[in-house]
């Protein structure tokens, strides 16, 4: 059996704005609205479906619980994406705890950086998978 992640739902206050934010930073397109979802398809076929709500399904619009989304990119893509992060003046960090501001990391022989989307989701790009070196 071949198992692949197909899609995941990302809670947002404004699904269109949050989807557009991710698409703009990663250099992707926002797909057409699908029911209540605003999709951003990643080149490996996984779709992030942005949904307006806090994710618990009760419709009360409570606080969104931040999640973490990491994207494996090439060295050239890292330069392009990181350039867009800096040109927008977005805060960025070398670590998931946001202790090393305005730095990138060189974990596993690659490069990585974290930043937040408008809803506080912790986004990350890396050029090498975790555990790749050594």
Image (cartoon, grey):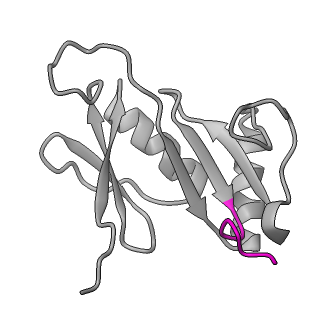
Position of residue 118 in the picture relative to residue 132 (left or right): left
Tell me what residue is drawn at x 17 percent, y 51 percent. Answer: 34
Task: Residue 76: name its quadrant.
Answer: bottom right
Residue appearing at x 85%, y 35% in the figure: 100
Q: Please state which of residues 130 and 42 is positioned toward the viewer in this rendering.
A: 130
Asked if residue 68 can be seen in this view, the reply is yes
**Quadrant in the rendering for residue 53:** top left
| Picture quadrant of residue 44 | bottom left
Pick the quarter of the image with the C terminus.
Answer: bottom right
What is the quadrant of the N terminus in the image?
bottom left
x and y percentages locating residue 92 in the rendered image: 75, 37
**Residue at 28% over, 45% down:** 38
Q: Which residues are magenta?
A: 126-134
Magenta: main secondary structure equals loop
Q: Is residue 22 magenta?
A: no
Using residue 36 as the reference point, say whether residue 18 is left or right of it. right
Q: Is residue 63 above or below residue 93?
A: above
115 left or right of 14 in image: right
Expressed as whole percent of the image width and height from the top left, the position of residue 113 reads 74, 49
Residue reaching furthest bottom? 1
Is residue 133 one of those drawn in magenta? yes
Residue 65 placement, left or right of 104: left
Instruction: Give the residue at the far front of this rendering.
Output: 134
Residue at x-position 51% and y-position 41%? 21
Count of numbered circles on the image: 0
Q: Which percent across, then down, holds residue 84?
A: 71, 48
Height in image: 105 above or below 41?
above
Give how far across and how far down residue 78 sits, in percent: 73, 63
Q: Is residue 110 visible?
A: no
């Amino acid at each position: 059996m071949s198992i692949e992640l197909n899609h995941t739902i990302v809670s947002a206050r404004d699904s269109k704005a949050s989807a557009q934010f991710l698409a703009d930073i990663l250099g992707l397109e926002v797909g057409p609205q699908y029911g209540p979802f605003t999709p951003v398809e990643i080149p490996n076929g996984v779709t992030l479906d942005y949904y307006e709500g806090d994710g618990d399904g009760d419709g009360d619009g409570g606080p969104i619980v931040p999640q973490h989304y990491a994207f494996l990119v090439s060295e050239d893509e890292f330069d392009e994406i990181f350039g867009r992060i800096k040109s927008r003046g977005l805060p960025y960090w070398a670590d998931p705890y946001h202790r090393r501001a305005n730095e990138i990391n060189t974990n596993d022989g690659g490069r990585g950086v974290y930043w937040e989307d408008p809803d506080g989701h912790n986004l990350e790009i890396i050029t090498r998978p975790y555990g790749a070196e050594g």
